[in-house]
Amino acid sequence: SSNFTSLMHNVIDQMLLGLKANQAAALAIKAIQNGERPVLTVSNTMESFLKDAGLSTGDAVDLSFKDVLMRYVRRSREITIKDRNGKKLETRPLTDDELGAKGLAAYEAVVDFVNETDLGDVPISPIDRVRELIEKAGYKVDEITGRSTRVDSTGKVPILRARAAHDKKASGKRRIIGDFNNGRLDVVILNQSGAASISLHSSPETGVNTKPRHMIIWQAEKNIDTHMQMLGRVNRTGQVTLPRYTQMIADVPAEKRPAAVLLKKMAS
């Protein structure tokens, strides 16, 4: 039950991140045009979905979000069998007989619902969608995340590519920070890999580009401590202009309620 709940939370997070991808890119582009330096933040890169699909670098990414959702529907009937000492023996799907008539009917109803649902243009890799849209607008973007792969959509077929290993190291992060603060990059996408000990604020001490920073919270951290650390990346001692913040919240209960909880925590 707890495993299934965790799976569903992951699916919802992925869907909400994807649903806001086009708007996140549009907000970043507008911020640049308004003379600001946008920083987009996410709590999860959603790379695990591509790994769960069994894809390797160089493979074509012939998947839709509906494929992702169906994969998790199938996993919802998996069980893990352990011995009396808690040692895992096997993980397998429940048979139709084990599900029983009512359970099987409920499972098939969910499968039919997913197959009939129009999920529109929800991207399989939201971060790469945003990067693609920003670059198409003529701007430069990079990321400070722990991702090992990215989806390259520049060709006729999207391909899973490996990210340069040095980009994930401290030296790579320093290069990206320097490029942003000195104007060689227009946008940085950030997750908790960069939630602490980096400075992206407007200050001549960090770089020559002192335009106002605009943090666009594309997907907020649920942990209030990590969230506050993230906000502080563009709001630091020595800044010459104050940053601006925009928090994106989809108009659905699955996101509005956690956002309200987060705002209450911030107020206290």
Image (cartoon, rainbow, N blue to C red):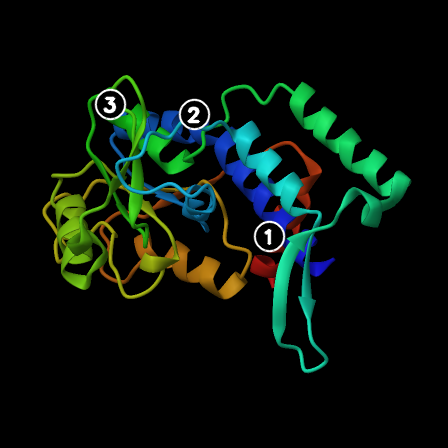
Tell me which residue sits at (40%, 62%) in the image.
Answer: 229
Q: Residue at x 52, y 30 (%)?
A: 65
Amino acid at pointer 2: Asn
Q: To which residue does mark 2 refer?
A: 22
User: For the residues marked 2 and 3, what is the alpha-carbon distance in whole angstroms?
Assistant: 17 Å
Residue depicted at 72% across the width and 80% down the height: 84
Residue 245 vs 130, above or below: the answer is below
Quarter of the view holding residue 62: top left
| Residue 268 vs residue 27, the one in the foreground | 27
Q: Secondary structure at mark 3?
A: loop
The spot of residue 252 in percent (x, y) is 67, 34
Task: Tell me the amino acid under the disc marked 1.
Answer: Leu
Q: Are marks 1 and 3 in contact (CB under 8 Å)?
A: no
Q: Is residue 45 visible?
A: no
Q: Quadrant of residue 250?
A: top right
Residue 160 point in image, percent of width and height: 30, 36
Please rate how many residues cluster around mark 3, counting C-alpha atoms within 10 Å: few if below 14, some from 14 to 19, many from 20: few
Contact, CB < 8 Å: mark 1 with mark 2? no
**Residue 6, image x and y in percent?**
63, 54
Q: Is residue 148 positioned above or below 30 on the image?
A: below
* Location of the N terminus (image quadrant): bottom right
Q: Position of residue 11 (x, y in %)?
A: 59, 42
Q: Of residues 67 and 251, which is closer to you in this image? A: 67
Quadrant of the rendering where the C terminus is positioned = bottom right
Q: Residues within 10 Å of mark 2 (few under 14, many from 20)?
A: some
Q: Which residue is mark 1?
A: 263
* Residue 151 left/right relative to 205: right
Which residue type does callout 3 highlight? Thr
Q: What residue would you read off at disc 3?
A: 154
In this view of the protein, which residue sits in the foreground, 136 or 32? 136
Q: Give the image quarter of residue 142.
A: top left
